[in-house]
Image (tube, rainbow, N blue to C red):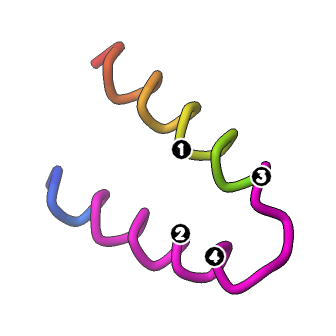
Amino acid sequence: MEAVGLQDDRIEFEALAGQPNSPKIFVHLLKRADSVARR
């Protein structure tokens, strides 16, 4: 289950990485890390 979520994040991250809005990537990763830490 966890691996599927990570795979989705990977795809989402790669999609974001292709765009010039780097700050959004870091905000997204911080939110993900925070939500994962709360579990």
Does residue 17 appear left or right of residue 11 in this picture? right
Q: Quadrant of the C terminus?
A: top left
| Mark 4 neighbour class, 10 Å CA radius: few under 14, some 14 to 19, many 20 or more | few
Q: In the image, what residue occupies the spot 85% across and 75% down?
A: 20
Callout 3: SS: helix
- Give how far across and how far down residue 22 sits, in percent: 76, 60
Q: Which residue lies under the disc numbered 4?
A: 17
Q: Which residue lies under the disc numbered 3?
A: 24
Dominant secondary-structure state across the stretch colored magenta: helix
Labels 2 & 4 near each other (Cβ < 8 A): yes
* Vertical position of residue 31 compared to residue 12: above or below: above
Q: CA distance from mark 3 to mark 2?
A: 10 Å
Labels 1 & 2 near each other (Cβ < 8 A): yes
* Vertical position of residue 27 compared to residue 4: above or below: above
| Mark 2 neighbour class, 10 Å CA radius: few under 14, some 14 to 19, many 20 or more | some
Q: CA distance from mark 2 to mark 4?
A: 6 Å
- Give how far across and how far down residue 30 sits, in percent: 55, 33
Q: How many marks?
A: 4
Give the mark nearest the N terminus, 3 or 2: 2
Find out whether residue 18 is within the magenta segment. yes
Q: CA distance from mark 4 to mark 1?
A: 12 Å
Q: CA distance from mark 3 to mark 1?
A: 9 Å
> Hey, which quadrant is residue 36 in on the image?
top left
- Give how far across and how far down residue 23 sits, in percent: 78, 49
